[in-house]
Amino acid sequence: MRLPRLNDEIRCHFCERQKTIFPSGTQEVSNRDFSKIAAYIVQADLSQMPSEMIEKGKMCILDGIGCGLYGLEFEATKFVLELANEWTGRPEASIMGTGIKAPSALAARANGVAVHVADFDDTSAQLRGHPTAVVLPPALALCERTFKTGRDLLLAYIVGVEVGAKLGKAMGWSHYGAGWHGTGTLGTIAAASASAKVLGLNEAKTAATLGIAASGACGIRENLAPWSRAFTQDRPLPRG
């Protein structure tokens, strides 16, 4: 099921009250900007968000899970599942639809590939990429690892998508036009935002998390053949 683009229709109520994180068309993101984003992440709460935004978030999460279950049939996902079975580690989080539990970073990686591999997952015109494939898997894995609730997952998901989309809106089409793929670049910061929210990091630690994520962000549009495309979103997951 293809859903309407989340960030074309929904704006975070908290962000709107703050006007914007930074002006549209900004080409660079400074440490001060990261501090603003970190403050938003820490302070964001479902009580501040309109009901239509919350319902859309629920729909996108369900859509992502559906895409992930379908994605289990693809070779790229089966390859990651083989690695999950071979690598040992603490069974912290589930790989959806398999009964396999793995370290949270590996579970997020496997689920991310499964969600994105068929290219049926949702898109964001502002992110210039696929937000759910990079935001949902780490948030889901960390929520399971830390025994958080569905409300915690929903909030972290919305926060991650909102941050990624606002960054994309600020940068405009120049980022995409230069050959970068938003799923891998901006998606890394979006994944880190959602992860920081699940873990309950304070503003200083959240800003540091965003900086580390930005340092590891990568993704180019030139290399979007089926297998490499499936793993484009794979890079943001362990970094987020």
Image (spheres, rainbow, N blue to C red):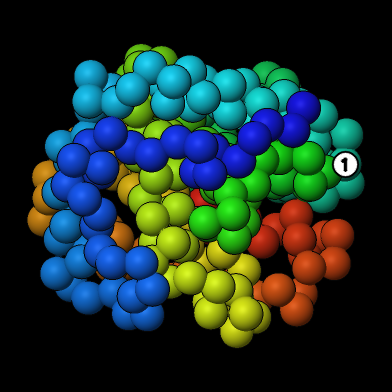
Which of the two residues, 38 or 54, is positioned nearer the viewer here?
Answer: 54
Image-based side of 123 in relation to 140, left or right: right
Above/below status of 206 relative to 111:
below
Image-based side of 106 in relation to 167, left or right: right
Q: Where residue 181 sits in the image (x, y, percent)?
A: 62, 69
Q: Quadrant of residue 97?
A: top right
Position of the N terminus, as image quadrant, is top right
Which of the two residues, 31 or 228, is positioned nearer the viewer here?
Answer: 31
Q: Is residue 117 visible?
A: yes
Residue drawn at point x = 42 percent, y = 26 percent: 53
Image-based side of 154 in relation to 135, left or right: left
| Residue closest to the far bottom | 178
Residue drawn at point x = 53 percent, y = 44 percent: 8
Residue drawn at point x = 60 percent, y = 84 percent: 178
Tell me the SS state at disc 1: loop
Q: Where residue 229 sits in the image (x, y, percent)?
A: 76, 61
Give the total of numbered labels: 1
Task: Determine crowd level at label 1: few under 14, some 14-19, many 20+ residues with C-alpha closer than 10 A.
Answer: some
Q: Where residue 60 sits in the image (x, y, percent)?
A: 58, 28
Above/below status of 142 relative to 209:
above
Above/below status of 69 relative to 17:
above
Q: Amino acid at mark 1?
A: Phe
Q: Where residue 56 sits in the image (x, y, percent)?
A: 51, 24
Q: Quadrant of residue 16?
A: top left
Q: Is residue 103 visible?
A: no
Q: Which residue is mark 1?
A: 74
